[in-house]
Image (spheres, grey):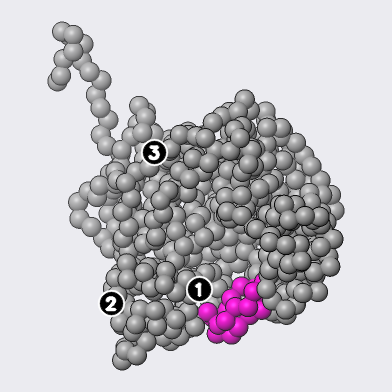
Amino acid sequence: MILHGGDSAAPAQPPPPRAHVDGGVVEGSYYDARSTDAVFKGIPFAAPPVGELRWKPPASVQAWRGIRDAKQFPSICPQQLYSPEYYAGISARIGGRLPQQRPLTTSEDCLYLSIWTSNFGSADRRPVMVWIHGGGNNGGWGTQGTDNGEFLARQGVVLVMIEYRVGALGFIADSALTAESPHHSSGNYGLLDQIAALRWVQRNIAAFGGDPTRVTAFGQSSGALDVTCLMMSPLARGLFQRAISESGVCTGPFAALKEPVTSFSEHPAAEESGSQLAKALGISGATNVLGAMRAKSADEILAAMSRGSDIAHEVIVDGWVIPQQPDKLLVEGRQLSVPLMVGSNADEFRTLAGAFPVPSMAGYSEQLLSALGSSAPLRAFVPRLLATYPASDTVQAERRLFELNTDGFGSGARYFARAMAKATQRNVYLYYFTHVVPTPGGQALGAFHTGEIPFVFGSDMGWPNGPYDLALRNAISGYWVQFAATGNPNRRGLPGWPRYEPASDRYLELGDTIRVGSRLRQRQYDLLDDAQAALDARSR
């Protein structure tokens, strides 16, 4: 016994939190004074995808003896790390302080998840939110831009952040990989990792106070695209009961495994990317090309991809994970029908592209067409593009190109919401995020891509705050948590959020003022819907 001040004993420290999961026992730590407030970092949900397991579906967790430490974040999956990091770059542009970032290491041994709960050891079960990070399916990691999961856990959910394979290691297809697969498929390994993590959650999350019958898959950007792609996958059925898509949806047409596809650009057969990678690695003439590819280090593959920057690595229609074109599945109502929140930000492309310079107005129509897509079927839309995005000079034309690229996010969100509502899913909710950081740099960026994330997670990103930021954070996180709990974001004390119905086309604006609007950018979104329909008709 340790004595303080003579005869007063220090309160006994609770034992570290431990949980039985696939593979053995893990020991986490407490993030607050209560023994229910626990965090577990770096729990494996699959075997390391290395050696012969590279470019294969995730294998079962390897069991361990004794107590496995779960107090440190895992390495992130192999990727190019940029300086400044995305959020640090935003802070510099808007006049904020640089956010703290933990030292990062990359490793192919990266299939881990981390859990925050304020319900550890309790008999009741709370809703679960599984975060799928963005990064173009080419980079990113679970805690990028989110600090940690403590804030949401305190709001009443069990939060899970997962890592998954990205880039060439996560999304490249190859004919030799297809040939060795019992499913006659290759590519989409990152999606398979996400499915494996969701299966792990179903089997294990009750040990952390979570309810496996109330799981919300939510993500942003490519993570949002992936969430909605999982809604197209028979492999994901029953693994989550709600979905939140922030600035990204699974609409196509997508590249296919074995045949070229006319989309907004021309996609060759996805399997060609494997042979292009082998060529970039200098091993295309090897006796066993696939064995030689697996013998290369992750760094060598990253370097080869940087040299062959046009080598495709993306979600594809592979016939197994994604059985058919997502738009076909949507039209036929064959997607997973779960309550959905979906939306976009008012100025998405301000942080995704430096500029869209217009040298002269003589070439403006071609630049509009190029922004919409380069495939021949879209050329018929040039007159409508010029009428919908008119410009009298090059400065205005540059602004219009930003608008067109940003409208792709908003029209995609509306398209997906409409398809879900038409498929008789009543609980569909559309939003539009408009908050602007109150600095000159913030005004220049507007409501940029990823701008809503600190409001969802309650993260301190070092960005200057406005007078309405706290109220907006509490509202957004409140909507998200209530939706995870019930499939409906409405709760007492928050402005009402109407269900999405195509006839009324209502949405909720999330900004310094929270209000209901209708028919957001209808002319622009209708044009983009029509262009997508023209491409869909060719791909079916």
Q: Marks 3 and 1, Cα distance to the nearest angstrom?
A: 33 Å
Q: Tell me the chief SS of the magenta region.
A: loop
Label 3 packing within 10 angstroms: few (<14), some (14-19), many (20+): few
Q: Say which quadrant the N terminus sits in.
A: top left
**Looking at the image, can residue 305 be seen?**
yes
Amino acid type shown at disc 1? Asp
- For the residue pair 345 and 118, the one nearer the viewer reads as 345
Numbered tag placed on residue 310 in the rendering: 1
Range shown magenta = 253-270
The residue that disc 3 covers is 100
Amino acid type shown at disc 3? Gln
Q: Nearer the viewer, mark 1 or mark 2?
A: 1
Q: Marks 3 and 2, Cα distance to the nearest angstrom?
A: 36 Å
Viewed as shown, does residue 141 lie left or right of 60?
A: right
**Looking at the image, can residue 408 be seen?**
no
Label 2 packing within 10 angstroms: few (<14), some (14-19), many (20+): some
Magenta-span inclusion, residue 301: no
Q: Say which quadrant the C terminus sits in.
A: bottom right
Q: Quadrant of residue 289?
A: bottom left
Magenta-span inclusion, residue 258: yes
* Mark found first going from the N terminus, 1 or 2: 2
Viewed as shown, does residue 173 lie left or right of 55?
A: right
Label 1 packing within 10 angstroms: few (<14), some (14-19), many (20+): few
Secondary structure beneath dot 2 equals helix
Secondary structure beneath dot 1 equals loop
* Mark found first going from the N terminus, 3 or 1: 3
At 70% across and 66% down in the image, what residue appears? Answer: 367
* Mark found first going from the N terminus, 3 or 2: 3
The residue that disc 2 covers is 295
Secondary structure beneath dot 3 equals loop
- For the residue pair 464 and 505, the one nearer the viewer reads as 464
Q: Position of residue 298 (x, y in %)?
A: 32, 68
